[in-house]
C-alpha cells in the first residue's frame, strides 16, 4: 500500500456526508462543539484573537439569577422574546420549527444556543401571526443568506418589490430586507410583510426622516418609527447605534468616507448638534420597544469600509468594539442580537475580521455584506463578494447579505436578485460543507452519483437551477447521451470509469440511467436563459435543436449517437460525421 508522506490537517470535524460517501477524509475544520464558544469553526491562523469567554448568560437582566442550566426571573415576570424563553428553559414552537429545518440540531440545542446569545430566531409576534415560517441565524445552524430590495426615489414600486420578494425566496433567500427610500414606504413595507414567509428586516432611520432633514431628528421620532414598524411585523431592525462622535476623527482620511446611509446620516446629525448619537445614548429605550414585539437587533456597521483601502481601520474596529458593548446592553434587556459586518475587505484580512467580532461581541451571530475582495469589477460584484463571503462564513459569519451585479451601479432588477441569491447560496453551502456540518454534503454526493452514472435527468433534477443546467446541456445536445458535448464519446472519462467493472463509479443504486432519453423541447424559460446569455440568437437556438435532433436520427424516440443503443463504433461514427459537422456549420453561419 502506498504510504502518504504528508499528514492530513484533521482537527476532529465531522464528515459533512451523513453516509461517509466517497474517499475524502472529510472536513479540516474543528470538531463541532454545539453548546460551546466554537460550534462549527475553522482552525485559527496564528495571531487570531481567541473566542470571548463570555456569553449572553453573563449579561442577565437586573433581578435575574442563574440556577443550574437555566435562570430564574423575578416573580410575576412573563417572557416575551425567544431569548427570555430560552433563559428560562422553555422550548418554544419556533425553536421546534427551527430544529425541524436544521436536521443536525435538536430543539433543546436550539434553545441553548439562543440562551447563550449565539443564535437568534428573528420572529416578530405580529409576523408570526401571519405567514412567517421561523428560522434561525447562528454559527451552530446552516449559513443563511439575505436579499436586499426596496424602491428608490427614481426606480421601482410596491408591485415590483413584491415580485422581487417572491423571486428572492424562490432562489433561496432566508431573510429579506426592505431598504425602500422612495415611493410609499409604509405601504411597500406592509405588503412585503403580509406576503413574506421569511423574516423581514428594515433600516428604520430611512422612514424617520421622510419629509424632514436629518438635523431635525428627535428621540420621539426614533421611538415612534420603531413602534410603528414593530406593529407592522418587522422581524429585525438595523440600528446604527455604534457610530459615535469620537469615531468621526478616524474617518477624515479615508478614500471614500462613510458609505453606510444610516452611518452618514447620524454622523451629520452629531456634527450639527455637537452631541452623541441618540441611538447610543437612548439605546435602552429602543430595546424596550423592540422587546415588546420580539424584534431582533441587527446592530449596524455604520463605519464599514467602502473600499479595500479603508478596511480594518481604526474607525471600523472602534465601532465594532462599541457594537460589543451594545450587544451586552441588549442582552440585559432580553432582546436578541446579531451584529453587522464589513463590506470591502482584502482576502487576507477576512479571517481576522470574523474572529475579532467573535471576541468583541461574545459570539453573537455575525451578519456580513460580502465582503468584496476587490473593487475593480463593477457589474460582477456578486462574484467578487461571494468569494469573500465564502471565507467569511467559514471563519465565523452566520448570515451573508447578498450583493447583486447592480451593486454600486443601480437598483437591482428581478434577474439581478436571482444572480445575487445564487452566488450567495454557493458561498453559504460551500462554507457549510467545509465546516463539516453533518449532512451538508449529501446533496453534492447525490449529484455526483447522478453525474457518475451519466443520468442527465437526475443530474438536472438535483441541480439548484435545473432550467439553466438543462438549457446549457441542450444547447449542444438535446438527446440524452452517455457523454456530453464537452468531451464527446471517446474522451469521456466518466463513461470510461463507469465501464471499468472494478470501480464503483456510476453504479450507485437508484441512480441508474434509462437506456435512451430525449430531452423535451426547450421551455420558454430555458430559451430565455440562452437568449440572455448572448451566445446564440433565438433563431440559432431553435435551428440548433432541430438540426441536432434530425441529424442524429432522433425524430422519433431514439437517437443513434447513443452508444447504449447502437454499437460504440457506430455511435462514434455518427458523432463524427453528423454532430461535429452540425457544430461546424453553425460556426460558419
Image (tube, rainbow, N blue to C red):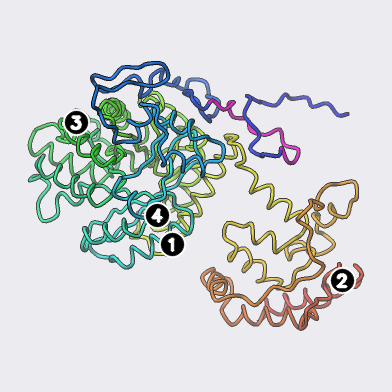
Q: Which residue is mark 4?
A: 197
N-terminal of the pair, mark 2 or mark 4, is 4
Q: On the image, which quarter does residue 9 sit in?
A: top right
Q: Which residue is mark 1?
A: 167
Left or right: 306 as drawn, with respect to 119: left
**Mark 2–mark 3 distance (CA, rounded to whole Å):** 74 Å
Q: On the image, which quarter does residue 314 sit in?
A: top left
Which portion, as a residue range, is magenta?
20-33
Q: On the image, which quarter does residue 167 sit in?
A: bottom left
N-terminal of the pair, mark 1 or mark 4, is 1
Q: For mark 4, does the 10 Å Cα neighbourhood hold few (<14), some (14 to 19), or many (20 or more) residues?
A: many
Mark 2 vs mark 4: in front: 4
Mark 3 vs mark 4: in front: 4
Q: Secondary structure at mark 2?
A: loop
In the image, residue 103 sits, relative to residue 497, either above or below, namely above
Residue pictured at 36% horizontal, 53% vertical: 148
**Mark 3–mark 1 distance (CA, rounded to whole Å):** 37 Å
**Quarter of the image where the C terminus is located:** bottom right
Q: Secondary structure at mark 1?
A: helix
Q: Position of residue 172 (x, y in %)?
A: 48, 54
Left or right: 489 as drawn, with respect to 384: right
**Looking at the image, can residue 357 be seen?**
no
**Mark 3–mark 4 distance (CA, rounded to whole Å):** 30 Å
Mark 1 vs mark 4: in front: 4
Check contact, mark 2 vs mark 3: CB within 8 A: no
Check contact, mark 3 vs mark 4: CB within 8 A: no
Q: Position of residue 107 (x, y in %)?
A: 48, 35
Q: Which residue is mark 3?
A: 284
**Mark 1–mark 4 distance (CA, rounded to whole Å):** 13 Å
Q: For mark 1, does the 10 Å Cα neighbourhood hold few (<14), some (14 to 19), or many (20 or more) residues?
A: some
**Residue 31 on the magenta segment:** yes
Direction front: furthest residue:
76
Amino acid at each position: 500500500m502506498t504510504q502518504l508522506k504528508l499528514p492530513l490537517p484533521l482537527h476532529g470535524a465531522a464528515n459533512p456526508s451523513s453516509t461517509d460517501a466517497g474517499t475524502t477524509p472529510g472536513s479540516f475544520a474543528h470538531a463541532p462543539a454545539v453548546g460551546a464558544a466554537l460550534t462549527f469553526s475553522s482552525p485559527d491562523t496564528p495571531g487570531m484573537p481567541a473566542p470571548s469567554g463570555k456569553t449572553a448568560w453573563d449579561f442577565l437582566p437586573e433581578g435575574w439569577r442563574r440556577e443550574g442550566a437555566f435562570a430564574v426571573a423575578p416573580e410575576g415576570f412573563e417572557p416575551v422574546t425567544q431569548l427570555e424563553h430560552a433563559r428560562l428553559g422553555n422550548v418554544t414552537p419556533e425553536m421546534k420549527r427551527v430544529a425541524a429545518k436544521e436536521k443536525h440540531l435538536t430543539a433543546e440545542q436550539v434553545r441553548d444556543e439562543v440562551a447563550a446569545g449565539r443564535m437568534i430566531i428573528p420572529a416578530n409576534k405580529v409576523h408570526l401571526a401571519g405567514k412567517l415560517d421561523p428560522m434561525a441565524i447562528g454559527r451552530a445552524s446552516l449559513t443563511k443568506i439575505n436579499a436586499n430590495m426596496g424602491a428608490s426615489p427614481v426606480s421601482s414600486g410596491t408591485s415590483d418589490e413584491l415580485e422581487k420578494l417572491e423571486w428572492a425566496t424562490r432562489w433561496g433567500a432566508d431573510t429579506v430586507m426592505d431598504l425602500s427610500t422612495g415611493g410609499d414606504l409604509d405601504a411597500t413595507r406592509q405588503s412585503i410583510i403580509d406576503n413574506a414567509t421569511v423574516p423581514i428586516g428594515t433600516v428604520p432611520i430611512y422612514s424617520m426622516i421622510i419629509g424632514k432633514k436629518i438635523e431635525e431628528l428627535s428621540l420621539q421620532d426614533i421611538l415612534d418609527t420603531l413602534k410603528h414598524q414593530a406593529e407592522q411585523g418587522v422581524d429585525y431592525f438595523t440600528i446604527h447605534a455604534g457610530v459615535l462622535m469620537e469615531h468621526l476623527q478616524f474617518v477624515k482620511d479615508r478614500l471614500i468616507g462613510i458609505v453606510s446611509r444610516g452611518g452618514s446620516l447620524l454622523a451629520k446629525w452629531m456634527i450639527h448638534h455637537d452631541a452623541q448619537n441618540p441611538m447610543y445614548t437612548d439605546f435602552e429605550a429602543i430595546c424596550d420597544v423592540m422587546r415588546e414585539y420580539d424584534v431582533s437587533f441587527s446592530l449596524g456597521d455604520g463605519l464599514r469600509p467602502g473600499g479595500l483601502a479603508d478596511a480594518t481601520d481604526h474607525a471600523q474596529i472602534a465601532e465594532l468594539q462599541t457594537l460589543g458593548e451594545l450587544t451586552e446592553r441588549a442582552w440585559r434587556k432580553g432582546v436578541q442580537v446579531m451584529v453587522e459586518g464589513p463590506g470591502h475587505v482584502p482576502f487576507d484580512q477576512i479571517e481576522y475580521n470574523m474572529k475579532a467580532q467573535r471576541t468583541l461581541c461574545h459570539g453573537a451571530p455575525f451578519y456580513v455584506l460580502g465582503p468584496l475582495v476587490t473593487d475593480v469589477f463593477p457589474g460582477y460584484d456578486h462574484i467578487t463578494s461571494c468569494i469573500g463571503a465564502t471565507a467569511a462564513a467559514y471563519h465565523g459569519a452566520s448570515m451573508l447579505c447578498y450583493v447583486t451585479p447592480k451593486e454600486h451601479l443601480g437598483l437591482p432588477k428581478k434577474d439581478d436578485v436571482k444572480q445575487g441569491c445564487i452566488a450567495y447560496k454557493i458561498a453559504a453551502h460551500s462554507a457549510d460543507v467545509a465546516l463539516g456540518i453533518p449532512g451538508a454534503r449529501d446533496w453534492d454526493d447525490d449529484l455526483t452519483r447522478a453525474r457518475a452514472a451519466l443520468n442527465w435527468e437526475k443530474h438536472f433534477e438535483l441541480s439548484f437551477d435545473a432550467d439553466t443546467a438543462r438549457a446549457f446541456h441542450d444547447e449542444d445536445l438535446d438527446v440524452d447521451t452517455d457523454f456530453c458535448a464537452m468531451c464527446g464519446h471517446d474522451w469521456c472519462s466518466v463513461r470510461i470509469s463507469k465501464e471499468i467493472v472494478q470501480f464503483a463509479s456510476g453504479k450507485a443504486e437508484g441512480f441508474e440511467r434509462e437506456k435512451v432519453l430525449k430531452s423535451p423541447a426547450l421551455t420558454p424559460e430555458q430559451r430565455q436563459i440562452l437568449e440572455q446569455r448572448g451566445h446564440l440568437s433565438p433563431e440559432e437556438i431553435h435551428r440548433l435543436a432541430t438540426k441536432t435532433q434530425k441529424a442524429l436520427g432522433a425524430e422519433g424516440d431514439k437517437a443513434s449517437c447513443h452508444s447504449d443503443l447502437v454499437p460504440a463504433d457506430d455511435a462514434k461514427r455518427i458523432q463524427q460525421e453528423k454532430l461535429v459537422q452540425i457544430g461546424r456549420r453553425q460556426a460558419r453561419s
